[in-house]
Amino acid sequence: MGKSAGETFMVNFVVLNEISLPLPKDERKMNRVLKEFSQISKELKENNINIIRSARNLNEIELVDGEYLSEFLGKIDDKDLKRLAISIFSNRIIEMKSPLYTKEEADENDVGLIEYKYKDKSVSGFGAGDIFDTIVVSFLTDDEWNNSKIEIKKESMENNGEVVFEDLQIKHSSTLENLLIHKDFFNILIDDKYNVLKDEFWDKKDELFKKIKFCDEIEEQIKVLSKEVYESFINKLKLIEIGIKDVEEWNFSTESKSTMERYALERTFYHSDFSDRIAFENHIKSFPDSNRMYFLKMDEIVYIGYIGKQLNTIKYN
């Protein structure tokens, strides 16, 4: 997993800049800071980033001068502010977890031989941002954190014992505005995440798709798709999952009554959510080589029943 020169890998987490804490004691200022952090947390979640890694567990971080998590929450008087703080620090929006590295990740990246500094302060969070090529998020407790890039210094030891010094610009956010500057990062992550081979699809589908479910028949149908059709299939699913497109925004048709009377069985599929097999009438046409995707939208879930060559109709058989 290590990153060599010129190599980039994508991770589905960001890291916390712990030196942006503690929070201001004044509750009005604290409210502004927490609202900003809440906004970027929600945006990260919308872009399939579900974890903020930190060097220490939340219970070990001084959130306000002299106050740790339980004491900090207990001293907030304003009910709305307390509710906001709980949503952030109880992982209700996005999970904050430690450590920054697993043992394997630390060993592979020679973490013990590297030091990262910001204004002479050691900054392990920014170091993880460099090693994992991900975004570092801060609480907006000072104007210095209101930037989309933060410059830090890296000191690393080469195999010959020589110490090398580098100035780095690390992707950073403390507001929704400067988080959105890194939209390309999310796009790359999305493309990378959904770059799944056909023989991996069935095992990974539940991890990749929360808004889409696949009928049992899909497992075998996927295996015989051409590369072009499969890529088109994955791309459409991805756009549905991340909320860019609705399944009904593509060129889709509903089968005629006469076709369903004669060929309904071809369009009848099973999923464990159903009490019995269900006939799917709607299908998307915009696939290469006249392939079709039959779907059923029910209770905000899109069920996919069929992907493959055009099925029999009254006009086509």
Image: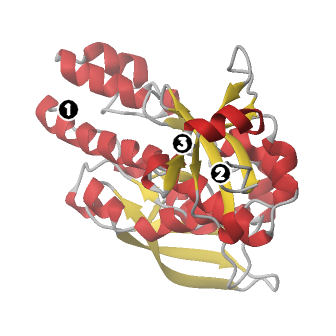
Give the vertical position of 28 relative to 289 (above or below): above
- Number of numbered discs overlaid on the protein picture: 3
Name the N-terminal-most of marks 2 and 3. 3
Rendered location of residue 268, percent (x, y): 73, 32
Q: Residue at x 73, y 44 (%)?
A: 205
What kind of residue is marked 2? Met
Give the vertical position of 109 relative to 157 (above or below): above
What kind of residue is marked 3? Asn
Query: In screen coordinates, is 265 left or right of 296?
Result: right
Q: CA distance from mark 2 to mark 3?
A: 30 Å
Rendered location of residue 179, percent (x, y): 35, 60
Q: Residue beneath label 1, please?
A: 25
Name the N-terminal-most of marks 2 and 1. 1
Q: Quadrant of residue 206?
A: top right
Q: Residue at x 40, y 51 (%)?
A: 19
Rendered location of residue 283, percent (x, y): 59, 48
How dense is the environment of label 2, judged by Cα within 10 Å: few (below 14), some, or many (20 and up)?
A: some
Q: Residue beneath label 2, please?
A: 293
What kind of residue is marked 1? Lys
Query: In screen coordinates, is 214 left or right of 85?
Result: right
Q: Residue beneath label 3, please?
A: 50
Rendered location of residue 68, percent (x, y): 41, 25
